[in-house]
Amino acid sequence: MAVTVESTKTATEPHSGNAPVIVDLGKKRRKLIKQLREGRGKLMDEINTLVDELRSAGTISAGAQPVIVVVQQKQKSPSLFWPMS
């Protein structure tokens, strides 16, 4: 799984200590996104593991810091049986 982590700290930002960390998980199935919204499932486990790794590496502080997670829903694949007449 390729995860993109991007810190948005800039020199002109007044609160650079609380800059959000953006995590891009890519395209995932609708069911996984629904479970993430409910606070459970595989994606929630991946995010918790990722946040723990970022904290241990010192990328984010142990205190409260905004983490933004970006997930796109995969498009449905076309049905193979639909055009049968």
Image (cartoon, rainbow, N blue to C red):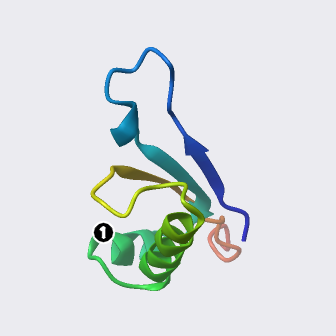
Image quadrant where one finds the N terminus: bottom right
Q: Residue 80 or 69: which is nearer the viewer?
A: 69
Q: Position of residue 29 (x, y in %)?
A: 54, 71
For residue 18, above or below residue 29: above
Element under disc 1 = helix
Tell me: 22 left or right of 85: left
Q: Who's the residue at 54% across and 59% down the image?
A: 58
Q: Who's the residue at 47% across and 47% down the image?
A: 21
For residue 17, above or below residue 29: above
Q: Position of residue 71 (x, y in %)?
A: 50, 56
For residue 15, above or below residue 67: above
Tell me: 10 left or right of 36: right
Kind of residue sitting beneath label 1: Arg
| Occupied quadrant, residue 12 | top left
Q: Position of residue 18 (x, y in %)?
A: 34, 40
Outermost residue, top side? 12
Q: Residue 42 or 48: which is nearer the viewer?
A: 48
Q: Position of residue 77 (x, y in %)?
A: 65, 66
Q: Who's the residue at 62% across and 71% down the image?
A: 82
**Label 1 neighbour load within 10 Å: few <14, some 14-19, many 20+:** few
Q: Residue 33 or 78: which is nearer the viewer?
A: 33
The residue to which callout 1 is attached is 37
Image quadrant where one finds the C terminus: bottom right
